[in-house]
Image (cartoon, helix red, strand yellow):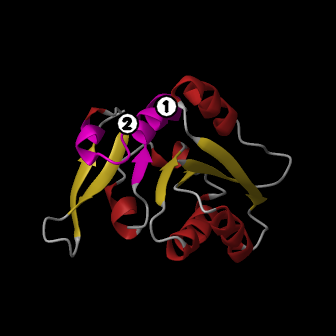
Amino acid sequence: MKILWLDINSSYSHSSVALPAIHAQVQEKAEGWEWCVVRGTINDTPGALAAAVAELEPDVVAATFWLFTHNMQLEVLSRVAALLEEVRIVCGGPEFLGDNEDFLRRNAFVSAVIRGEGEEALPQWLGAIGDESRWEAIRGLCWISEAEDGDSRGTYHDNGT
């Protein structure tokens, strides 16, 4: 499985510490996982960042949302989802500490949101990515399951913090 970290910051002098922290936590569980990174700032072109992500053809794109990167992340991720129909997108960070239902319903291309410590939840989610029935056990994970008719989004799930 190829996992891409979309690292968008407000400037190049503000690097995210989320990726190294998560990467360190998943090393033991990451057999067969390939990691790559696309870095940019809020001043970059969303289309260029999305093209850089799509060129790497990841199975999963993970991104941390901050107040100043929120809109840019959505611009890039929505384009990535359009370019790579099978990609799974997971988001985390301080922008998701509250109720995430409205965000997930408005952004149906996002597979899940992690509230709280991504270092714990992300490796669990990656290990269960193909089996949504196992997602209920992942603390902090929020998602909307597919509706039974397959035409619309279904039930919101919130596994707390």
Location of mark 2 (residue): 140
Farthest top residue in view = 28
> Tag count in the figure?
2
Q: Residues at badges 1 and 2 in contact (C-beta under 8 Å)? A: yes
- In the rendered image, the residue lying farthest to the right is 13
- Residue bearing mark 1: 117
Q: Amino acid at mark 2?
A: Gly
Horizontal and vertical percent for residue 15? 77, 43
Residue 130 percent across, percent down from the top left: 34, 48
Label 1 residue SS: loop
> Which residue is painted at 62% across and 68% down in the image?
76
- What is the magenta segment's predominant secondary structure? helix
Q: In the figure, residue 52 lies in which quadrant?
A: bottom right
What residue is rendered at 80% in x and 45% in y?
14
Which residue is nearer to you in this view: 44 or 149?
A: 149
Q: Is residue 115 visible?
A: no
Where does the image place residue 82, in percent across and percent down from the top left? 51, 76
Side of 136 relative to 93 (left or right) = left
Q: Is residue 156 magenta?
A: no
Q: Which type of secondary structure does the marked residue at label 2 adopt?
A: loop
Label 1 vs label 2: CA separation?
8 Å
- How many residues crowd around disc 2 within 10 Å: few (fewer than 14), some, or many (20 or more)? many
Q: Quadrant of residue 154?
A: bottom left
Question: Could you say which is closer to the camera, residue 141 or residue 132?
Answer: 132
**First in sequence: mark 1 vs mark 2:** 1
The residue at the far left in this view is 148
Q: Residue drawn at (60%, 33%), measured in percent from left and top?
A: 22
Can residue 148 be spotted in the picture?
Answer: yes
Residue 116: percent from left, percent from top: 46, 34
Residue appearing at x 48%, y 34% in the figure:
123
What residue range appears in magenta? 112-136
